[in-house]
Image (spheres, helix red, strand yellow):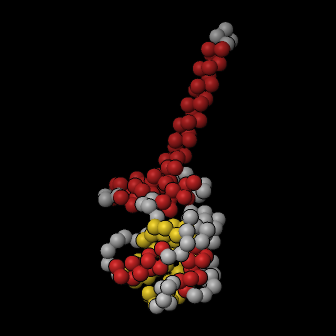
Amino acid sequence: MTIYALSSGPGISGVAVVRVSGKDTAEVVKKLTGEELPSARVATLKKFNKIDTNELIDEGVIIWFPGPNSYTGEDLAEFHVHGSRAVISALHSSISKIKNCRLAEPGEFTKIAFQNGKINLLKAESIADLISSETEIQRKQALKIMSGRSSDKFNSWRKKLLKILSHIEAKIDFPEE
């Protein structure tokens, strides 16, 4: 299944990012642009057209991330378009007409990244924390966890606890020694 969603915040903005991920992402890009895939990881200016009528939706930037070297580990594309409700709605409507494409649920891109081994559970949770952070302290804590420093601390504690546990088990099994 190929999923798509508005990745930038909702509401009117200068630029909105619509992300598409899954096995049919290349087909989505080709149908919306009417051209072959752009170069990988290069921002490319393109015109995006409605699939059924070929009417222009918007002109914007597309970035193509072939899997497995993408955030989700699958083929992924980002459409950077003008952030009006009409443009986003027209883009979503066109993508929805492509077979096996559906609107992503909240957090689904991160869920797929976790399932594909691109991020660990701590990082997945810290991304949600960073997105919902409201204070400077919350932001810093989420970034600290995301960077892996907390994970390093937890792994250090785990090693110490395993060593202590092995000593206790040895004392129980061999009390005379």
- Look at the picture and state if 124 lies above or below 104: above
Residue 75, located in which quarter of the rendered image?
Answer: bottom right
Toward the top, the furthest residue is 176
- Look at the picture and state if 139 lies above or below 151: below
- Look at the picture and state if 74 lies above or below 90: above
Horizontal and vertical percent position of residue 84:
35, 81
> Could you tell whether 159 is left or right of 48 in the image?
right
Q: Residue at x 52, y 69 (%)?
A: 101
State the residue in front, 68 or 164.
68
- Look at the picture and state if 142 lies above or below 171: below
Q: Residue at x 49, y 67 (%)?
A: 102
Residue 71, located in which quarter of the rendered image?
Answer: bottom right
Toward the bottom, the furthest residue is 55
- Report if residue 154 is visible in the image: yes
Horizontal and vertical percent position of residue 37:
62, 82
Query: How many numbered discs sit on the rendered protein?
Result: 0
Quarter of the figure that contains the C terminus: top right
> Could you tell whether 81 is left or right of 99 in the image?
left
Horizontal and vertical percent position of residue 9:
37, 70
State the residue in front, 4 or 117.
4
State the residue in front, 81 or 176.
81
Q: Residue at x 32, y 78 (%)?
A: 12
- Report if residue 143 is visible in the image: no
Q: Residue at x 56, y 64 (%)?
A: 1
State the residue in front, 82 or 154.
82
Horizontal and vertical percent position of residue 36:
63, 85
